[in-house]
Image (cartoon, coloured by chain):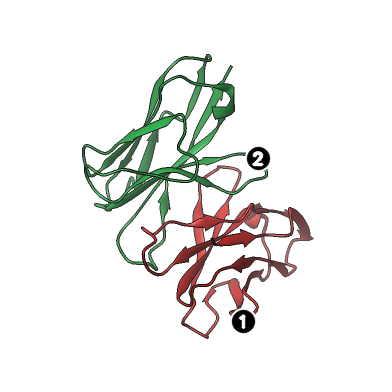
Chain colours: A green, B red
Amino acid sequence: NAGVTQTPKFRVLKTGQSMTLLCAQDMNHEYMYWYRQDPGMGLRLIHYSVGEGTTAKGEVPDGYNVSRLKKQNFLLGLESAAPSQTSVYFCASTMTGSNQPQHFGDGTRLSIL
Amino acid sequence: AQTVTQSQPEMSVQEAETVTLSCTYDTSENNYYLFWYKQPPSRQMILVIRQEAYKQQNATENRFSVNFQKAAKSFSLKISDSQLGDTAMYFCAFMKHRNSNYQLIWGAGTKLIIKP
């Protein structure tokens, strides 16, 4: 069982460069989420999706865009990377039902120089 | 707005001891869900235990149990017979029952170190 797979696992960018993080899940989950994790803080929600073709802003959406063209994939884009976006990024998915846990990928460590 | 507070940034205990991690939350909701997640050095986020607010009985999963005090809005995690593999960051998380899109509100985490 692959579960939630994030690509890439590590990346170093220069300020102003763009890139896309890919999240893929094989559990047929409707809901998908992108978080960032910074030292001393809990996970913060960037964007989320409640189904194929839908996206919505979370707590810290500025500087990021997302797309959910296929149910199994949720892409996170950085149009013009900034040092403040240096973080570990996690993707998660869940099935409908409030008591269902979110399943997480292994994270992507992104450094912006 | 809901908030989750973990007041212990770091804790350490000897192997085989029992340790309790604290979590408090603030909400006006009556029905909700609470979770404890573990993040070992490998970085993977793993569900440890969950609790439905409408259930009075405390959830247990093997060596892990919770003390859920709804009136006090407290949700502590007890780890019995701690093992070296329990070394990790532990996060408490809250989810509303309805109209939440299943979003989780996270605490800042507690770093737990199990010493041999």
Q: Position of residue A71 (x, y in %)?
A: 22, 44
The structure residue drawn at horizontal position 67% and vertical position 71%, both measured from the top left corner, is: B80
Seen in the picture, residue A110 relative to B33 is either above or below; the reply is above
To which chain does the residue with label 1 belong?
B
Which secondary structure lies at badge 1?
A: loop
Q: Nearer the viewer, residue A84 or B78?
A: A84
Image quadrant containing the C terminus of chain B: bottom right
Relative to residue A102, is residue A78 depicted above or below? Answer: above
On the question of residue B115 being in view, the answer is no
Cα gap from disc 2 to disc 1, whole angstroms: 31 Å
Q: Quadrant of the N terminus of chain B?
A: bottom right
Whole-percent x, y for residue B92 in the image: 58, 60
Residue B73 sits in which quadrant? bottom right
Circles 2 and 1: CB distance less than 8 Å?
no
Pick the front one: A33 or A107: A33
Please report the residue visible at 72 percent of the width from the left and 70 percent of the height from the top.
Answer: B18
Q: Could you tell whether A4 is left or right of B13 in the image?
A: left
Task: Please give the name of the residue rendered at 39% of the width and 61% of the height, measured from the top-left corner.
Answer: B100
In terms of image quadrants, where is residue B20? bottom right
As displayed, is residue A63 above or below residue B52?
above
Q: Which residue is mark 1?
A: B71
